[in-house]
Amino acid sequence: MEDLKGLIEKLPPELSQEVSDFIEFLLKKRARSKGKLRLDWAGGLREFRDQFTSLELQKKALEWRGD
């Protein structure tokens, strides 16, 4: 690891920042992939099943999320 630190220190500041950004990206990507799929939302729209079709519920959910 010391070799990596030395190499980064030799880079100009803008490239050093790019390396730092890339490392942060890799760490976040790895953290996301380790998480288990959450299903606590399942059945969250149950109260609306008699008012809307599944397609209408999808559209409403997107509206509510702001997408």
Image: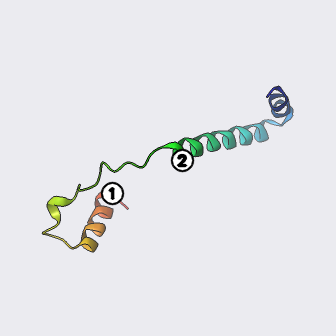
Determine whether 46 is above or below 54 in the image: above
**Residue in the picture at 63% in, 39% down:** 24
Q: Secondary structure at mark 2?
A: helix
In the rendered structure, the answer to whether residue 14 lies left or right of residue 51 reads: right
The part of the image, by quadrant, that contains residue 8 is top right
**Residue in the picture at 82% in, 26% down:** 2
Residue 35 at x, y percent in the picture: 48, 43
Q: Are marks 2 and 1 in contact (CB under 8 Å)?
A: no
Residue that lies at the very extreme toward the top in this rendered image? 2
Determine whether 26 is above or below 49 in the image: above
**Residue in the picture at 59% in, 43% down:** 30
**Residue in the picture at 76% in, 40% down:** 14
Which label belongs to residue 25?
Answer: none
Q: Of marks 2 and 1, which one's residue comes earlier in the chain?
A: 2
Residue type highlighted by circle 2: Ser
Between the C-alphas of marks 2 and 1, the distance is: 23 Å
Quadrant (top left/top right/bottom left/bottom right) for the N terminus: top right
In the rendered structure, the answer to whether residue 21 lies left or right of residue 11 reads: left
The part of the image, by quadrant, that contains residue 63 is bottom left
The 10 Å Cα crowd at callout 2, few under 14, some 14 to 19, many 20 or more, is few
Quadrant (top left/top right/bottom left/bottom right) for the C terminus: bottom left
Residue 53 at x, y percent in the picture: 21, 73
Q: Secondary structure at mark 1?
A: helix
Front in this rendered view, residue 40 or 11: 40
Front in this rendered view, residue 45 or 42: 42
Residue 66 at x, y percent in the picture: 34, 59
The 10 Å Cα crowd at callout 1, few under 14, some 14 to 19, many 20 or more, is few
Front in this rendered view, residue 29 or 63: 29
Residue type highlighted by circle 1: Arg
Which label belongs to residue 65?
Answer: 1
Q: Label 2, on which residue?
A: 33
Residue 26 at x, y percent in the picture: 64, 43
